Amino acid sequence: MSFRIIQLENLEVSIRKNAKNISMFFENSLIKKTMDDAEEKTLWTQDGSIELRNVKEINSVYKKNDKIISISISYDFYTYKNMLILPFLKQGGIDIEIQFYKTTKMINIKCDEMEILLKDKPKYVKHIKKTE
């Protein structure tokens, strides 16, 4: 089975908030791709955004441009830590904990929907050997 995983740790984001939504725009996110029957994985980069829709609660102030140190996304009884399988769209009660580089406090966000939107075409970086 082939799949793609986006790495969110150390991702630089530009944050914009409107009425009830938060968008975190990023460039050159790292995406690992695993193909059926392939000996090695491949590494790609791609631009896009993390969309948090219908934000119910946010506990702290954040900077408009920052780097994610760590992120934990809890949905149902699953918790995703620093990476997500693509495509990613979840609806329902979502709890997010984010530690940013420039913010001392952990930021907790509760929202009804989260989606990773990718734009343009991915750019190939390299093959990843089994030892990496």
Image: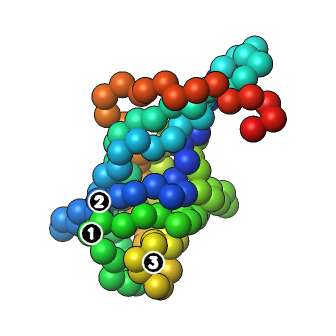
Q: Which quadrant holds the C terminus?
A: top right
- Residue type indicated by callout 2: Ser
Is 28 or 61 nearer to us in this picture? 28
**How many numbered badges does the structure rendering display?**
3
Q: Look at discs 2 and 3 and give the one toward the viewer.
A: 2
Marks 2/3: CA distance?
16 Å
Q: Which quadrant holds the N terminus?
A: top right
Which residue extends farthest right?
131
Marks 2/1: CA distance?
6 Å
Q: What element carries label 3?
A: strand
Q: Residues within 10 Å of mark 3 (few under 14, many from 20)?
A: some
Residue 107's tag is 3
Q: Residues within 10 Å of mark 1 (few under 14, many from 20)?
A: few
Q: Look at discs 1 and 3 and give the one toward the viewer.
A: 1
Is 20 or 100 nearer to us in this picture? 100
Contact between marks 1 and 3 (CB within 8 A): the answer is no
Give x and y (percent) for residue 74. 58, 63
Q: Residue at x 35, y 49 (%)?
A: 26
Which residue extends farthest left?
19
Contact between marks 2 and 3 (CB within 8 A): the answer is no
Of callouts 2 and 1, the N-terminal one: 2
- Residue type indicated by callout 1: Lys
Of callouts 2 and 3, the N-terminal one: 2
Answer with the quarter of the image where residue 61 lies.
bottom left
Residue 14's tag is 2
Residue 64's tag is 1
Q: Residue at x 77, y 19 (%)?
A: 39
